[in-house]
Image (cartoon, rainbow, N blue to C red):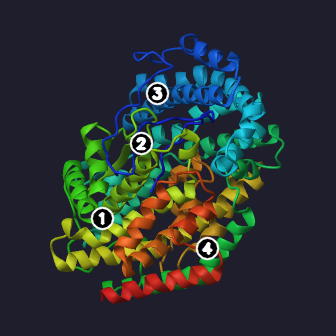
């Protein structure tokens, strides 16, 4: 459920001639009018004149301002897509030094030179007398974000942010090299994880130890990397006048509509109303497997004689089955994936040297995004594919919006798009599971994970709050605090005796901690929204899909609470509301049996 890696960018706008009300997936590359059609970014010398043009241009009327914004948008689209392709190519092949160097060159030699121009262009927009003539309601969220970017900009942070952009990608380089051998064959850790579903308990235990032992081989390297990231991020925050990086990052992420206290309330609600359900799920699992003790390598298993779910064998099969599934849900959704496939915007199968995780990366000029993941033939891969597909559909639906700033929607609503698609798509999972019993098992596992994911979300989020409130912490203090948090959010039904060394470094497998700090509570907020939309879907599928579409096509033109309201949802973290949604999921689970 990893989001797209984020390329820091300057906040101007992007105009599109794409008419989305027909819900067509036939996106074409945006036409260029300001930049030469054949222009490619090779160095700063060739790029800077376009920024100078925008900075020096005289704005004498509202019409001239609008054309200036369109030209600035066109430049941003070209720069953004170039940067995204460099990152995509590097994550697809972390062992290719040329690809790594191309990414590093952009982040160290081009991006730092863009940032001062970005700040000056933002100020030019905000200080322009004709900006006051813009419709206040239409431009409220957009101008709020521009002002936020001006407030956060500091010249002294430019080299730090360039270093961070390069440094945080080392997580993928380190993790991409991790493999284990099972029965004489080499597997990536993502591929090996499928053995944790095997009916053979000895094999599950063996593979569990191999995966975790392999991670421990790089624990020092990952610890050192995280320490360096925390220290540099803290310095960025201090330079910008913040007490800590958490407070800086909240503003950077545009969290205008909730606070750290809301996050704390979420953590407590998970302990109160989710953990008891998690414990019930694992008690049932233990009984189902006929075990006296449920060990971590048993959590994904089925009873002896029941084969693991294998919904597909290849990336191509996963693509075709997902398209068929979405076709039955709504043909437009399937068309989006067909378009991406035709454009070569899918890289789905796990392999050595490929970065871990999955993401959907929007591409500003091409229009259709890119989906990256590490499929190994499991149910998790199906949910990842429809999850990233939900993000992709969001990109298609928002593409018609006039300004690129309008398309910068809150990450929380972006994750509603992806998580709701996981739940909507279940209604057509017969595409993946022709056997009725397997289909029931797949839905059961998905609904269990809807519940069991909350404790991990709360743990990762709470760990980050502590880590950045205490940026000078030692590795020993970090480990100790992680174990305290783990005790809060780990079910006592699972027996972890003798496995403390694995647990102590369990946080190191979470990509977000390294690459997109504080991007994790979004999954919890979004899961609540997705469950709410699914409640509506169970009552009236067509109406729920319509609300889903009309909300996503608004992009970022409304505030987060307004987007939730448009979808018929409450923007609510309270224990009472979370309890209500959890009981709904519990009832749906019980209806399967």
**Which sits earlier in the primary sequence, circle 2 or circle 3?**
3
Q: Nearer the viewer, mark 1 or mark 4?
A: 1
The residue indicated by pointer 4 is 487
Q: Is residue 442 left or right of 586 when viewed as pictured?
A: left
Q: Measure the C-alpha gap from mark 2 to mark 3.
A: 19 Å
Distance from label 4 to label 3 (Cα)? Answer: 44 Å
Residue 402 location in percent, x, y? 52, 41
Tell me the residue that label 3 is attached to: 82
The quarter of the picture where the C terminus appears is bottom left
Pointer 1 or 3: first along the chain: 3
User: Disc 2 versus disc 4: distance between alpha carbons?
Assistant: 30 Å
Q: Which residue is mark 2?
A: 355
Query: What residue is shown with label 1?
Result: 379
Residue found 61% across the figure and 34% down from its top:
12
Q: Mark 2 Cα within 10 Å, few/some/many (few <14, many 20+)?
A: many
Point out the image quarter for the N terminus.
bottom left
Q: What is the quadrant of residue 343 in the picture?
A: top left
């Amino acid at each position: 459920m990893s989001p797209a890696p984020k390329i820091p960018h300057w906040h101007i706008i992007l105009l599109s001639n794409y008419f989305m009300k027909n819900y067509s997936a036939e996106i074409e590359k945006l036409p260029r009018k300001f930049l030469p059609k054949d222009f490619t970014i090779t160095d700063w010398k060739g790029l800077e004149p376009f920024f100078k043009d925008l900075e020096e241009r005289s704005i004498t009327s509202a019409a001239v301002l609008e054309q200036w914004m369109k030209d600035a948008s066109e430049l941003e689209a070209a720069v953004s897509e170039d940067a995204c392709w460099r990152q995509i190519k590097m994550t697809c092949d972390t062992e290719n030094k040329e690809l790594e160097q191309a990414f590093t060159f952009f982040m160290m030699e081009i991006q730092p030179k863009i940032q001062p121009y970005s700040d000056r262009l933002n100020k030019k927009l905000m200080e322009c007398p004709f900006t006051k003539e813009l419709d206040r309601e239409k431009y409220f969220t957009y101008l709020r974000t521009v002002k936020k970017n001006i407030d956060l900009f500091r010249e002294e942070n430019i080299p730090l942010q360039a270093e961070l952009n390069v440094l945080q990608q080392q997580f993928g380089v380190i993790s991409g090299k991790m493999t284990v051998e099972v029965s004489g064959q080499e597997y990536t850790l993502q591929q090996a994880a499928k053995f944790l579903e095997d009916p053979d308990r000895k094999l599950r235990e063996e593979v569990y130890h191999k995966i975790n032992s392999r991670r421990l081989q790089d624990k020092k390297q990952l610890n050192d990397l995280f320490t360096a990231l925390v220290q540099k991020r803290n310095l960025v925050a201090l330079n910008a006048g913040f007490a800590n990086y958490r407070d800086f990052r909240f503003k950077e992420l545009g969290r205008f509509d909730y606070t750290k206290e809301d996050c704390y309330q979420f953590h407590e609600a998970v302990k109160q109303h989710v953990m008891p359900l998690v414990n019930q799920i694992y008690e049932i699992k233990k009984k189902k497997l006929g075990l006296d003790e449920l060990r971590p390598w048993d959590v994904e298993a089925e009873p002896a004689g029941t084969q693991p779910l294998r919904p597909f064998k290849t990336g191509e099969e996963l693509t075709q089955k997902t398209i068929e599934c979405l076709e039955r849900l709504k043909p437009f959704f399937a068309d989006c994936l067909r378009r991406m496939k035709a454009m070569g915007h899918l890289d789905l199968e796990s392999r050595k040297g490929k970065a871990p995780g999955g993401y959907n990366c929007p591409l500003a000029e091409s229009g259709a995004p890119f989906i990256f993941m590490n499929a190994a033939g499991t149910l998790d891969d199906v949910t990842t594919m429809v999850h990233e597909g939900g993000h992709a559909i969001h990109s298609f639906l928002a593409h018609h919006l006039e300004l690129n700033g309008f398309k910068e929607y809150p990450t929380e609503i972006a994750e509603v798009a992806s998580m709701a698609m996981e739940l909507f798509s279940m209604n057509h999972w017969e595409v993946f599971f022709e056997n009725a019993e397997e289909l029931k098992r797949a839905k059961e596992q998905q609904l269990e994970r809807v519940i069991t994911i909350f404790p991990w979300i709360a743990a990762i989020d709470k760990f980050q709050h502590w880590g950045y409130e205490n940026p000078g912490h030692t590795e020993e203090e970090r480990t100790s605090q992680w174990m305290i948090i783990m005790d809060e959010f780990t079910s006592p039904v699972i027996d972890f005796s003798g496995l403390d060394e694995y647990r102590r470094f369990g946080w190191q497998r979470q990509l977000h901690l390294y690459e997109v700090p504080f991007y994790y509570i979004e999954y919890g907020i979004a899961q609540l929204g997705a469950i709410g939309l699914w409640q509506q879907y169970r009552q009236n599928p067509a109406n729920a899909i319509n609300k889903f579409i009309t909300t996503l096509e608004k992009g970022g033109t409304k505030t987060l609470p307004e987007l939730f309201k448009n979808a018929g949802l409450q923007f609510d973290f309270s224990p009472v509301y979370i309890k209500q949604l959890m009981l709904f999921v519990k009832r749906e689970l019980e209806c399967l049996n």
